[in-house]
Image (cartoon, grey):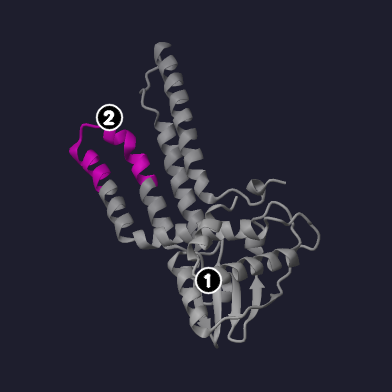
Amino acid sequence: MSNRSKLRMSVGLFYPIAIFSCYIIAISEWGIRSWLISEGMDIGQMPFLTYYICGAFFIVMGIYQWYKYRLWVYLVIGILVGFLCVQGPGMIISDYFFTKASYFITFFIIVLFVILNWSTLYGQERYEINARRLFKLGAELIYETADGFTDRPFSAGEITFSKEELLGFSRFMEGKYVTRVFHEDETVFLTFSLNRSVLTIVNPREASHVSISKSGAMTVFITESDYRQYRRTYNFNQLCHSLGEVIKRFMEYYKDGLENRIITELKTAR
């Protein structure tokens, strides 16, 4: 089975699909309105319906992403962009200054809001992309579909390292937006998720994670919501073991001074 199809489609891909669909709808609505006008119907040529559909899409997506990731910035952006779309026809056909001014004010607020919250938007995007890559690497050689999700952490063996190496590795992983790091009772948690934003969690157990104790014991935990992102019910223990091996391999790269191999391997995940 192709690795490309092992994970469900990313939420971010909905946007280009929806925007392309809106262009098709706009062309169709324009054609229908042109035909109705030629038949004598007194209606405008502007494809109002398409603007409203597009606005509703952005608002719904903002609500959905807010609920999914627990990031309020998505809700605000969704509402603002949706409102901008609804204002579109009025800005084009109206001669009133305040109608046009309202559109450009909304546009300015969106740009300003994105600039002020760019670090959050960028961080969430990078964390999710790399989490997807980690899950792809974890399932790379797994085809068995028995034994689905369990809520028990999986013991993934042990790894040898010094305290400085573990701290350096965890900082590297967080600095490259691969995992967000938590320290708890001399245990390091490397968290990642395709659902809940790791930027908003306060307890590492709220997301999928690999924990490494000071003795070198490694434990892997995958949340049910992340596990359900796979298109098939892969053997859960094998998947956890494979993810643990990925992190062990990355740690060895770091210890050998080959940090770039970590990024290269992530980018080649398919």
User: Does residue 89 show up magenta in the picture?
Assistant: yes
**Is residue 13 found left or right of 8 in the rendered image?**
left
Please state the horizontal and vertical placement of residue 10, each as a whole percent of the image: 55, 50
Where's residue 152, x and y in %? 71, 74
Q: Which residues are magenta?
A: 82-105
User: Residue drawn at (80%, 63%), measured in percent from left and top?
Assistant: 147
Q: Quadrant of residue 131?
A: bottom right
Q: Position of residue 162 (x, y in %)?
A: 54, 84
For label 2, the crowd category at 10 Å Cα-Cα, with few meaning under 14, some 14 to 19 and many 20 or more, is few
Specify few, some or many for label 1: CA neighbours under 10 Å numbering under 14, 14-19, or 20 or more: few
Q: Element under label 2?
A: helix
Residue 186 vs 25, above or below: the answer is below
Determine the image quadrant of residue 90.
Answer: top left
Amino acid identity at mark 2? Ile
Q: Residue furthest front?
A: 256
Dominant secondary structure, magenta: helix
Badge 1 amino acid: Asp
- The circle drawn on residue 256 is 1
Q: Residue at x 46, y 70 (%)?
A: 172
Which label number is shown at residue 93? Answer: 2
Ranked by sequence position, the earlier of labels 1 and 2 is 2
